[in-house]
Amino acid sequence: MKKVYVTRDVLPDGISLLKDKGFEVEVWAKDRPMTAIELHEAAQKVDALWCTMADAINKNFLMSNSHLKIITNYAVGTNNIDKEAAAELGIIIGNTPDVLTEATAETAFGLMICASRNFKAAMKNAENGEWTHFQPKGFLGPQLKGRTLGIIGMGRIGGRLGEMAQGAFGMKIKGYKRGDNLIEFLSDLDVLSLHIPLTPETKHFIGRKEIAAMKSSAIIVNTARGDVIDQEALYEALRDKKIFSAGLDVTTPEPLPPSNPLFSLPNVMILPHIGSATFEARTEMSVMCANNIIAAFP
Ligand code: DGY
C-alpha cells in the first residue's frame, strides 16, 4: 500500500479519491504549516507528498527525501519547490493548473474594483462610525470603463482577467510580450495586473524605475507572487501618491506582519493570498492533486 502525507487539512474530495484507490493517507491536522523538521519527519515515512506553497521544498529537503516518487503542490505556482533539484533526483512535481484560473482572475478583478474605488478607506469609514453624512467629494476614484488594463503574463489567469475586464467594463487590454519595452508599456496604463510566475528572472520585475514610469493615477494589482514587485518601492510610491492605489493578494513575506507599513496606507488593499479560495477551485485542486499522485503510481 502506497503512503501519502498531506501537509494541510485540504478539502476532502481528493483525500477520499486516494483512499478509494487504495492509498494510505495521513493529513497534518494542526491549523498551521509544518516546520521544516516536522515536514522532513513526515516525508520520511511516505511515498508521496501533497504540500502547499507554504512548504519550502528546497534542495536539502529533496536530497534527504529522494525516496519520494512525487510531490504535488496544492497550487498552480511552484516557486516553493526547487524543480531543478527534483528533476535531478527523479522526483515528479505536480501542481494544479487550469482549475483555479477563474477564481484567481475573479480575485484580480475584485482587487481592481476595490483599489480603484477606495473600498478600504470607505469600509473603514462606515465601520468606525465616521459615516455621519453624505460626502460629495469623498472616496473618489477612477471609473474603469474604457481604461487601459495592462497584463503582464497573458497565460490562463491573465487572459481570463482580460476577457472579464473587456466584457464587463469595455477596458482596453494590453498584453506585455517578452521583448516589448517595459517602460513604454507601463507608462500607458491605467491598471497593471501581474500574472507571471516567480523565478530568478522575474524577481522585482516591477521595480522602482518601472513604478516611476507609471501614471500617478495608475493602479497596480498583484495576484501572482509578492516578489515580482519590489515591495519597498511600491510602498514608497503609494505613500507619496506617485500611483493611485494597489490591490495585493500576495506579499513579501507571507503572512505579512500587521506591523508592515503597507497596512497603514489607505490606498492599498491586502488580502491573505486567497486567489484560489472558491469552493469550486479548492475542490478541483484537491481532486487534481490526488490524480497527480494516482498517475505517478501506475
Ligand atoms: C497558486 O495556486 O499558485 C495561486 O497563488 C493561488 O492563489
Image: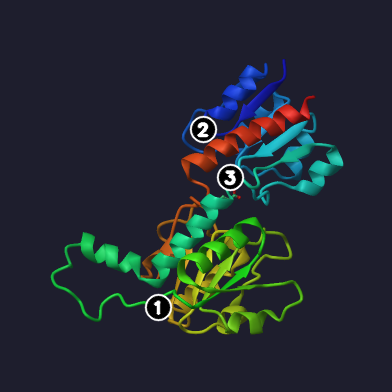
Q: State the SS at label 3.
A: loop
Q: Quadrant of the N terminus?
A: top right
Q: Position of residue 5 (x, y in %)?
A: 63, 27
Q: What residue sits right under mark 3 in the picture?
A: 54
Q: Position of residue 51 (x, y in %)?
A: 63, 37
Can you say whether 233 is above or below 98 in the image?
below
Q: What residue sits right under mark 2 in the picture?
A: 11
The answer to which image quadrant residue 176 occupies is: bottom right
| Residue type highlighted by circle 3 | Ala
Can you say whether 11 is above or below 84 in the image?
above
Label 1 packing within 10 angstroms: few (<14), some (14-19), many (20+): some
What label sits on residue 216 in the rendered view? none
Q: Position of residue 143 (x, y in %)?
A: 40, 76
| Residue type highlighted by circle 2 | Leu
Report the side of 20 relative to 217 (left or right): right
Give the mark toward the camera: 1 or 2.
1
Please give the name of the residue rendered at 66% of the width and 25% of the height, measured from the top-left corner.
4
Instruction: Answer with mark 3 or mark 2, whichever residue precedes in sequence.
Output: 2
| Residue type highlighted by circle 1 | Pro
Q: What residue sits right under mark 1 in the picture?
A: 142
Rounded to the nearest whole Å, what is the CA distance between mark 3 and mark 1?
A: 36 Å
Report the side of 222 relative to 91 (left or right): left
Q: Decide if residue 249 is in sight here.
A: no
Q: Is ligand 1 within 8 Å of the beta carbon of the residue shown at mark 2?
A: no
Rounded to the nearest whole Å, what is the CA distance between mark 3 and mark 2?
A: 17 Å
Please give the name of the residue rendered at 44% of the width and 75% of the height, measured from the top-left corner.
145
Q: State the SS at label 2.
A: loop
Label 2 packing within 10 angstroms: few (<14), some (14-19), many (20+): some
Q: State the SS at label 1.
A: loop
Rounded to the nearest whole Å, what is the CA distance between mark 1 and mark 2?
A: 39 Å
Give the mark toward the camera: 3 or 2.
2
Can you say whether 148 is above or below 59 in the image?
below
